[in-house]
Amino acid sequence: MSSTINHLHHHHRIDGQISPLTSSCPHLADFRSRNGAKPFRALQDCLRVKPPGGRAGIRREPSEVPRCAACGDSSPSRLYACVACAAVFCHAPSGGPSHASAHAASMPLGGHEIAVDVDRAELFCCACRDQIYDRDFDAAVVLSAIAVQSSGNPENMRKRRRVDYRPWSPDVRERLLMDNGSSVLDCEIDRPRGLRGLNNLGNTCFMNSVLQALLHTPPLRDYFLSDRHNRYYCQLKNAATTGRIGSGVGGGGKRNGGNGVKLCLACDVDAMFSAVFSGDRKPYSPAKFLYSWWQHASDLASYDQQDAHEFFISMLDGIHENVERDRGKPPSPGHGDCCIAHRVFSGILRSDVMCMACGFTSTTYDPCVDISLDLEPHQVTAHGKTSAKSHPSSNSEANGFSSTQIPTTSTLIGCLDRFTRPERLGSDQKFFCQQCQVSQESLKQMSIRKLPLVSCFHIKRFEHSHTRKMSRKVDRYLQFPFSLDMAPYLSSSILRSRFGNRVFSFEGDDGDDVAANEMSSEFELFAVVTHSGKLDAGHYVTYLRLSNQWYKCDDAWITRVNENVVRAAQGYMMFYVQKMLYYRASAQVCPS
């Protein structure tokens, strides 16, 4: 590391002018006047960038632990390598001790003020005690990243190998286990396996539509069909815990509900997967599951029509509750390691609120299992003129339901663009700036920190007016793509567009996670839940994409439809699965 940095001493002065995009730091200007117009290009060989587009840092051996040359500490707030002599010194922000600044001040001839962050490869002035920007240094980082991506080093491509598809074939022991523990299923050409109608139990189309989507969610389906949640074992474990044994798996009201103990919703989901994929084509009645769900959501326990999105959230929470009882305090849902519901659907949203006075940014992260989107606010007036007003959180003016609205076309891409667009908060929504120490007006921008395996988009079609004290449904048509690239809406992409092509590292952003997100940002549509009719008298239907063919699931009736029928449907919830999971998920396997 030192040999490459010390090479800067041998450059002759070529041009002392500073680029217009270069920082106004006088010490950086002095450094450039000493070492030439492009003094940082020699640093390219000692920079390391994790592929693809990951965090940049100073190249060093895996066993090498950088330490401060003054105090010997290896874990202070930040470590900086002097560009002039390659010595490493620590620096504590917010007015703390800084051996890096002391080193720069101790040099009588100067020239040691500029340093590089060892872990983040960001330029730093030890005299000003602040980060600085130089276009030449930024070019060195970009060239280093390009060199990593174009090289064939197996170490650089380890992330890509993790997601490559590798076919699996059972060995002798696994073949014996499959022969003894399974039976051959008949393969029907006219309809994929698992496509089975669900009987309406009395205004339960909202439940049937969501269940059809979940039954054919590839990661969720594989989890339950591979016996990862065994309902028989789960009942025995719960019986040992409570000291009572129910009347049987999937039994009636005396199973556990009468003892004040909530039924295991995941057990009923497991039973439903077994029934739907058993090969029986007759419509299935999910009555036992409905009863268990009523135990978890007692406020929704009725035969009234419910909202499909509300049922979806309630069902995932019910599956999660079982894990919470078994493990005590569960891990954070956003990290995808607590239960199957969150491992499949949970992502992380990032919210940046920036003070418009000083630029201070407050960042928060929130787990989510779906993203609710407003329809684009384009509207056509009765006079035939088109307008496109920007509203922060509603589809109509102040939720007042303008009488001149005529339904127009929105797109899912436009809704996502609007969701991640910077939004200026009003004067009544000022936030307390920690740097200004007063409440200031601010800009807020949402982005996706971590993508889930399955992305669910909920379209806000039901509006509630506080002024008129009434509700209505928005019948505007929504165009949605069958293939969706989520890369433009990732936090890493939005931060790059905000700060330029330079790869910045922020608190909570790990380079490995950023690389994994960007490599798995392509999604495929596999289920669409639609709503037709009015707010209080509507009907839910699901369209499923199986083996490149679309099917309409209308309660107990299953029919094959053309993709144009799906595109014309009034989408309410769209389910997208990561493309690397989908491209093998819909393949139909028949016994040879």
Image (tube, rainbow, N blue to C red):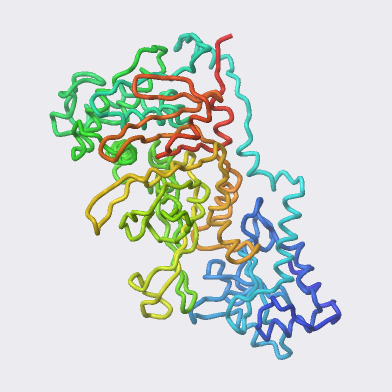
Quarter of the image for the C terminus: give it: top right
Q: Compare residues 485 and 114 and report the one nearer the observer.
A: 485
The foreground one among 73 and 290 is: 290
Image: 218 above or below 297: above
Outermost residue on the bottom side: it is 108
Tell me which residue sits at (47%, 17%) in the image: 193
* 219, above or below 426, in the image: above
Q: Is residue 497 above or below residue 72?
A: above
What's the residue at 25%, 32% (across, down)? 293
Apparent side of residue 36 relative to residue 299 in the rendered image (left or right)? right
Find residue 301 and report its horizontal and vertical position in percent: 19, 34
Question: Residue 437 is drawn in which quadrant?
Answer: bottom left
Q: Position of residue 382 (x, y in %)?
A: 41, 54
- The correct choice, above or below, for 125 with respect to 217 in the image is below
Residue 550 in picture, x, y percent from top left: 50, 25
Give the residue at the far front of this rendering.
Answer: 383
Tell me which residue sits at (20%, 31%) in the image. Answer: 303
The image quadrant of residue 286 is: top left
Quadrant placement of the N terminus: bottom right
